[in-house]
Amino acid sequence: MILDGKCPKGPIQTSWDRHRFDLKLVNPANKRKYKVLVVGTGLAGGAAAATLGELGYNVEAFCYQDSARRAHSIAAQGGINAAKNYPNDGDSIYRLFYDTIKGGDFRAREADVWRLAQVSNNIIDQCVAQGVPFARDYAGYLDNRSFGGAQVSRTFYARGQTGQQLLLGAYSALSRQVKAGTVKLFARTEMLDLVVVDGEAKGITVRDLITGEIRTHVGDAVVLCTGGYVNVFYLSTNAMGCSVTANWRAHKKGAFFANPCYTQIHPTCIPQHGEHQSKLTLMSESLRNDGRCWAPKKKGDNRHPNDIPEDERDYYLERKYPSFGNLAPRDIASRAAKEQCDDGRGVGPGGRGVNLDFSDAIKRVGEHTIRERYGNLFEMYEKITDENAYKQPMRMYPAPHYSMGGLWVDYNCESNVPGLFVLGEANFSVHGANRLGASALMQGLADGYFVIPYTIANYLAKTKPGTVKADHPECKKSVEDVKAYNNRLLNINGKRTVSEFHRELGKIMWENVGMARSEESLKDAIKRIPALREEFWKNVKVTGKGEELNQQLENAGRVADFLEFGELMAKDALHRNESCGGHFRVEHQMPDGEAKRDDENYCYVGAWEFKGVDKEPELHKEPLTFENVHLAVRSYK
């Protein structure tokens, strides 16, 4: 099937404005008749629920955390992009659009990216009005800093905790609507199935994580804002509760999964320190504004970094990419760090690390200024490593961080299942094969505040409200299916823990479907994952009961989904015989080691249809066209 993204025709500069005018509206009195289910309360979900409630819709919002403000968006550190051009350094909506298309290695839709760039400025105004404490300069104006893949300073930030401050802004707007009665909030609730009636999404089946109750909520549309899937690697910068489950259960009910092989490996994370570690810690890309990445020129040089003289240091990003230096995009910076370590010039235990050095910046602007910019990040680093980064370089190594792939959506953020909308990291739409730093927060808030309020009305205006009730046969079947699935997990009573299986899957994925992939490694993964999945269903041990708080059962369901999803991810990577962005096939690289795209054969979105476990999924394609930014070899040199 050739998929239609339903992008507006005509000049891209007016595409979103014209499209909004063409969308159908729901009048204020009728909005009260519709119910919208929003799953996830991060920046995309919190913004969407608050905005739809403000408009007058009845909204039910769900999160598995104990509070909506604990969504994983809270972990974002460095900033949010917008084309305000406050520093007067040459930025514009077009430049943000261009940088994002190029940064994604020409694997994103132009129309979606233009809209993102266009509404980026509205986001900053919205957040300032909410009281988000963005950094300001001496005169009181909003301050900016630089991020990877851009030669302008367009990133707004709140020290090293921008995600937390933006989420508190969205949460305050959400709380206002909860008080007003337009939004009902269900915390400690996990979505385990999508209810599809006559081909349209009309509800979700959830498990109350405190009581274990399994029930269905029905509505007129469902909005998934459930984040990414890089915990398939086991070790990642994501919170341990982050999973593919909501997306995967929707996928099994008919929603296409687009570009699952596009995962982002972040170049600056604290290196793994042991076999029994459960997650990794991100160090913001913003640190590369002032920190310089280097490795010793000599192999096996175990001297203290402060004892290695300047002429024996290789500032490899500045050497390889002089135009962008330490602010090269994430996929490129990650591969460059791995290259140094593979060459025997890594630092720290096992040689899996490179230095991020602030000594020059401290000499230039003083330690006080560096503390003002990144103080909480330096504190976090010292708590974890017991090293003072003001006195010696930080040690960094790349780690799984973000998913560019996700459920397929059209320009309206609607999946191929009518009534199922997907926002933020959960969809595939704007980042292509590599997300630029500080663009995730931009996408989440753009989708939640400024896109879904318009596009969902177009669907609801053609839908009769309240047609499906909780006693519908499909709702009853969904509840029975979820109960049976959970009981199956509880009754296996094997000998291995859920974490053991997750750790083993993560090792297979990291070694074979990680930063560097090959036909051989991907085929090995595709062979080993089904065998591990089979053992899981025979030998996992899940203690306790379903009718109580049972985190083992929660994790077992999430790992079961990862064991199915991991195979699809490897198959997508195998079918894409090219390198682009975060998808790096070692057989397809330039003489200088850079990614080699194949635009003739792979300039499309690959969206997969579920056909059953242990059955081959079906590939559908959406061709990508580039009329405003012409296809070119991506270079940051």
Image (cartoon, rainbow, N blue to C red):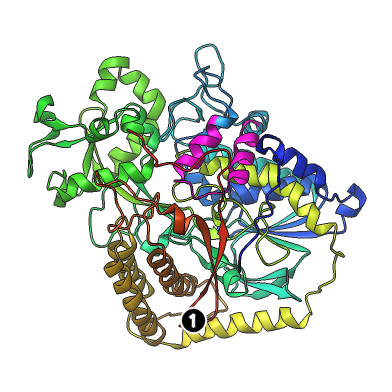
- Name above or below for residue 240 compared with residue 215: above
Q: Amino acid at mark 1?
A: Val
22 or 295: nearer the eye?
Answer: 22
Q: Position of residue 256 (x, y in %)?
A: 58, 67
Looking at this rendering, what residue extends furthest in the top direction?
A: 139
The image quadrant that residue 340 belongs to is: top left
Q: Quadrant of the C terminus?
A: top left
337 or 502: nearer the eye?
Answer: 337
Q: Quadrant of the N terminus?
A: bottom right
Q: How many marks?
A: 1
Q: Position of residue 227 (x, y in %)?
A: 53, 55
* Residue at figure coordinates x 14%, y 31% from the top left: 313
Q: Position of residue 491 (x, y in %)?
A: 47, 88
Residue 174 visible at all = no
- Name above or below for residue 247 compared with residue 631: below
Horizontally, is 165 left or right of 383 in the view? right
Residue 482 highlighted magenta (yes or no): no
Magenta region's main secondary structure? Answer: helix
The residue wearing badge 1 is 613
Residue 266 visible at all = yes
Boundaries of the magenta span = 95-121
565 or 493: nearer the eye?
Answer: 565
The image quadrant that residue 94 belongs to is: top right
* Residue at figure coordinates x 68%, y 74% from the top left: 215
Residue 119 highlighted magenta (yes or no): yes
